[in-house]
Amino acid sequence: MRDRTVKQAIRSGVRTTPIERKPRRLRIYNNVVLTQDEIKLAVEMARADRIEQQIRDYAYKRGNHAVQR
């Protein structure tokens, strides 16, 4: 959607230059320390989610569109 300013700039032949975005710095506020049990649980949960997603993708690719994404 073009507003009035953009229309005027186009009609008058104004050239624009793209603005390069700088990468944002990652700010860590707290030093989080996880225990071994928490890390194992997180890995298991991620693995289960990945397997479910792979099953859904395979079913969708095979033509079973009844499986909701």
Image (tube, rainbow, N blue to C red):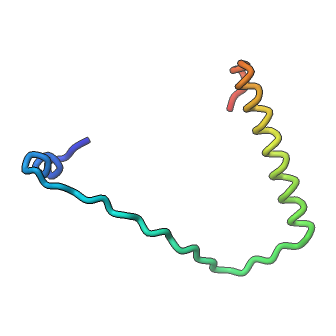
Q: Residue at x 10, y 49 (%)?
A: 8
Question: In the image, is 55 to the left or to the right of 24?
Answer: right
- Looking at the picture, does residue 67 appear above or below residue 22? above
Q: Residue at x 86, y 65 (%)?
A: 39
Q: Residue at x 53, y 74 (%)?
A: 25
Question: In the image, is 29 to the left or to the right of 14?
Answer: right
Q: Nearer the viewer, residue 9 or 36?
A: 9
Q: x%, y% of residue 65?
A: 69, 21
Q: Residue at x 17, y 55 (%)?
A: 15
Q: x%, y% of residue 29?
A: 63, 80
Give the position of the C terminus as an image quadrant: top right
Q: Quadrant of residue 31?
A: bottom right
Q: Nearer the viewer, residue 68 or 23?
A: 23
Q: Quadrant of residue 61?
A: top right
Q: Quadrant of residue 60?
A: top right
Q: Nearer the viewer, residue 12 or 37?
A: 12
